[in-house]
Image (tube, rainbow, N blue to C red):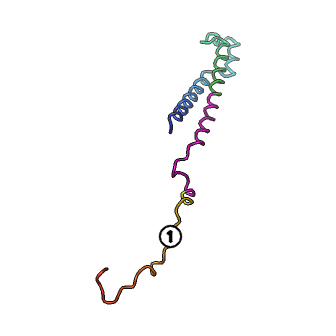
Amino acid sequence: MSFWTNVLIVTHVLVALAIIGLVLLQHGKGADMGSGFGGGASGSLFGATGSANFLSRATAILATLFFLLSLALAYVATKKPVEPGGGGVIDALKNRPAAQEKKPAAEETKPKPAGKDVPQ
């Protein structure tokens, strides 16, 4: 694989891990109901509403990046250069030189002269 393909794969994996982390950090819809009745959501790191906007936007940006990286990897995988002499089995059979016709084994052997046991 080329250097840029490796870079795409590593970036793709890192973005996927970041998306997983961001989704796990977000509160579900049930958490908003609890904060309305005196829950401790207002004392969180980003405030009562700041975390939802920041984490939602970051997740959307990473999801878009993940989608674009997936398309780029699919493009790179289908556009590999054809190596000389490479290809499939059928291509190898088509490019093979024509085989010479062989005679049956009975016709290829020369009859030995009678009485001579010495190989020629």
Q: Where is residue 95 in the image (x, y as percent from the top left)?
A: 55, 59
Residue lying at the far left in this picture: please name it: 118
Q: Is residue 68 above or below residue 33?
A: below
Q: Height in image: 120 above or below 1?
A: below
Query: Image height check: is 116 above or below 13?
Result: below
- Please state, as top left, top right, bottom left or bottom right, where the C terminus lies in the image: bottom left
As for residue 120 lying within the magenta part, the answer is no
What residue do we see at 51% from left, 37% from top?
2
Q: Which residue is drawn at 59% across and 27% down?
A: 20
Counting from the top left corner in percent of width and height, residue 31 is at 67, 19
In the rendered image, the residue lying farthest to the bottom is: 114
- Quadrant of res 38: top right
Near-viewer residue (97 or 60):
97
Task: Point out the stretch of residues depicted in magenta.
Answer: 65-91
Residue found at x 69% / y 17%: 32
Side (left or right) of 81 relative to 38: left
Q: Residue at x 66, y 12 (%)?
A: 48
Q: Could you tell whether 36 is left or right of 103 in the image?
A: right
Residue 93 placed where, x, y %?
55, 60
Tell me which amino acid carries mark 1: Gln
Tell me the SS state at disc 1: loop
Depicted 120 relative to depicted 85: above or below: below
In the rendered structure, the answer to whether residue 89 lies left or right of residue 113 reads right
- Image coordinates of residue 6 in percent, x first then y, are 51, 34
Q: Main secondary structure of the magenta part?
A: helix
Circle 1 Cα neighbour tier, 10 Å, few/some/many (<14 / 14–19 / ≥20): few
Q: Does the magenta stretch include residue 66?
A: yes
Q: Nearer the viewer, residue 4 or 19?
A: 4
Q: Mark 1 points at which residue?
A: 100
